[in-house]
Structure formats: structure tokens, C-alpha cells
């Protein structure tokens, strides 16, 4: 098992362990000889974990300020804070601090520069999406991930897959295969005659998480196949991922809306 404790008193703890295919990650309060789980688990999305060659990896997302001032340390930007980490090779589902290795480090989180940069992250039903507008706000870098060895995709301008402007892909022989397409209800997508995505990257992590990234202009100039993403508006997005063919049942699917920022020229001096 391994754990992280936030703050000078080290009372706000995240711990986890992997036994076989079972992954346990908990938001907890430090105690002796073992931590006690918080009533509310303040994670963004579902934590993941993997064990390989004697090494355990735990991955989680946590807000700097979870809103739970009773149990969680508030982590402020531009201020240093202490992280205490512990780990033990004890192959057990019981966390015991008595014989654990313990170290502490000081970290500092820097606030984002006050420029036209805009970035946002979202998660739902095991699907994670992060996008960052280009410096000139003409396009965005999109990064999507999910726990799948099959495929995943994101659709623009709709809450359903049928007919949506879709970018989907998979990892084949270690390389990303990503397509600009049109979604079809109950069938494989139809790839566009012209692909308007670029700078494609992707990988399949050892814990089974697939990550695919690509660049796309807000207005690709392809009015036939591509949805125009307008600034200062709400945009519907639909996502899906699965282990088998795209037309088969999806492992996960859902929809959410993002509010794109108004162009910089439309923001007044009061913000």
C-alpha cells in the first residue's frame, strides 16, 4: 500500500492498494496505527490503480479545494505546502503506519498566468476530457481518456451519437489511429473525406487507460462535415468508449455541455 498526506499536520490522507484485480483508493483521516475513511470521498472521477513487477501505481484527481473543510486540506496556489508519503510492502488490505517508510517534501502549485489562455477539464462515467484553447483562440487541443483497450470518441454539437461530428480512435500496435468522422446510429462511423484534425498523439497505459489527443480548429472551414464551435456559447458534447467494434454496445457513454469563453475583446475591464 501507499499513501499521501496533505498539509503540515498530515491529517488529510489519500491511501490505496492493489490486490489482484481489486483496486482500493480512499480519502481518509490520519490515525494511529491506521487512517479512517472520510464519510465523503472527494475524488473527481474514479481513482485507478495497477501493480506490475512489484511496483504499485495509484492515480486520482482531487480539487485543490474540495469544499469539505472538515476533512480535507485546502491547497492554495502560490503557497508551499507539505506532502508526507508513506508506503509498505505489507501485502494486506489493512493500512498500518507502524512499519511504513515515511518521507516529507514541500510542494508549490503556481497559479495560471493571467493571459488569454483558457483550459477546462471534465469527467463523467469513467470518461475524462481536457481541452485547451490555442493562444490565438482559433482552435483547441483536446485530450480524452478512459479505461478501455478498445476505442473512445468525442462528438461535437450534439448529445447523441447518431449524425454527430465525431473524432474517435484506438491504439494499434502501439500507435494511435484517430479519425474525423460522422456518427451512425448502431453502425460504424463514416470517416470524413477530409480529416480536419492534426497533431494526433495516443497511448495505452499499463493500467488499461487509453489516452488520445488531437488538435482541431473551432471552425475547420468544412461546413459539410464539421460542427463550428463558437466562442461565448454553450456547446453540447457526446462521448463513448468500448472494448469491441464501435457499432456494438458501448462500455460507457454520456453527454455534457461546455461553456466556451467569450472572445478576449468582449471581456470588459471588470472581468
Image (tube, rainbow, N blue to C red):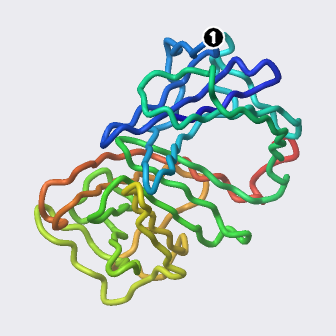
Relative to the observer, which residue lies in front, 194 or 240?
240
Residue 130: x, y in percent? Answer: 54, 55
Secondary structure of the residue carrying tag 1 is: loop
Q: Examine the image and state in which quarter residue 154 appears.
A: bottom left
| Image position of 253 (left or right of 213) | left
Q: Residue at left 36%, top 37%?
A: 19
**Residue of label 1:** 32
Q: Is residue 202 above or below residue 64?
A: below
- How many residues crowd mark 1 within 10 Å: few (<14), some (14–19), many (20+)? few
Question: How many labels were placed on the picture?
Answer: 1
Q: Residue at x 46, y 35 (%)?
A: 17
For the residue pair 138 and 201, the one nearer the viewer reads as: 201
Q: Is residue 246 above or below residue 120?
A: below
Q: Residue furthest bottom?
A: 193
Which image quarter is the C terminus in?
Answer: top right
Q: x and y percent of residue 22 in the render?
A: 33, 37
Q: Nearer the viewer, residue 187 or 151?
A: 151
Whether residue 265 sits left or right of residue 253 in the image: it is right
Q: Nearer the viewer, residue 137 or 230?
A: 137
| Residue drawn at point x = 88 percent, y = 36 percent | 79
Residue 180 lies, in percent from the top left, at 36, 77
Q: Residue at x 45, y 59 (%)?
A: 144
Amino acid at each position: 500500500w501507499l499513501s499521501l498526506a496533505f498539509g503540515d499536520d498530515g491529517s488529510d490522507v489519500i491511501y490505496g492498494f492493489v490486490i489482484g484485480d481489486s483496486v482500493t483508493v480512499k480519502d481518509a483521516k490520519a490515525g494511529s496505527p491506521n487512517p479512517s475513511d472520510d464519510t465523503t470521498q472527494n475524488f473527481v472521477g474514479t481513482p485507478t490503480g495497477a501493480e506490475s513487477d512489484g511496483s504499485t501505481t495509484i492515480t486520482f484527481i482531487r480539487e485543490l479545494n474540495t469544499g469539505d473543510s472538515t476533512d480535507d486540506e485546502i491547497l492554495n496556489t502560490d503557497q508551499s505546502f507539505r506532502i508526507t508519503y508513506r508506503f509498505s510492502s505489507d501485502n494486506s488490505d489493512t493500512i498500518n503506519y507502524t512499519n511504513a517508510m515515511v518521507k516529507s517534501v514541500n510542494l508549490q502549485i503556481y497559479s495560471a498566468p493571467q493571459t488569454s489562455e483558457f483550459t477546462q477539464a471534465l469527467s463523467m462515467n469513467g470518461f475524462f476530457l481536457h481541452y485547451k484553447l490555442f493562444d490565438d483562440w482559433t482552435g483547441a487541443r483536446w485530450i480524452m481518456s478512459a479505461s478501455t483497450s478498445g476505442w473512445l470518441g468525442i462528438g461535437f454539437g450534439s448529445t447523441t451519437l447518431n449524425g454527430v461530428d465525431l473524432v474517435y480512435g484506438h491504439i494499434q500496435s502501439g500507435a494511435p489511429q484517430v479519425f474525423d468522422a460522422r456518427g451512425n446510429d448502431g453502425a460504424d462511423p463514416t470517416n470524413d473525406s477530409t480529416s480536419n484534425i492534426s497533431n494526433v498523439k495516443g497511448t495505452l497505459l499499463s493500467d488499461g487507460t487509453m489516452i488520445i489527443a488531437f488538435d482541431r480548429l473551432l471552425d475547420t472551414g468544412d461546413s459539410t462535415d464539421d460542427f463550428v464551435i463558437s466562442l461565448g456559447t454553450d456547446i453540447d458534447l457526446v462521448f463513448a468508449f468500448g472494448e469491441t467494434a464501435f457499432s456494438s454496445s458501448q462500455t460507457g457513454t454520456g453527454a455534457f455541455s461546455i461553456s466556451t469563453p467569450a472572445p478576449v475583446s468582449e471581456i470588459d475591464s471588470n472581468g
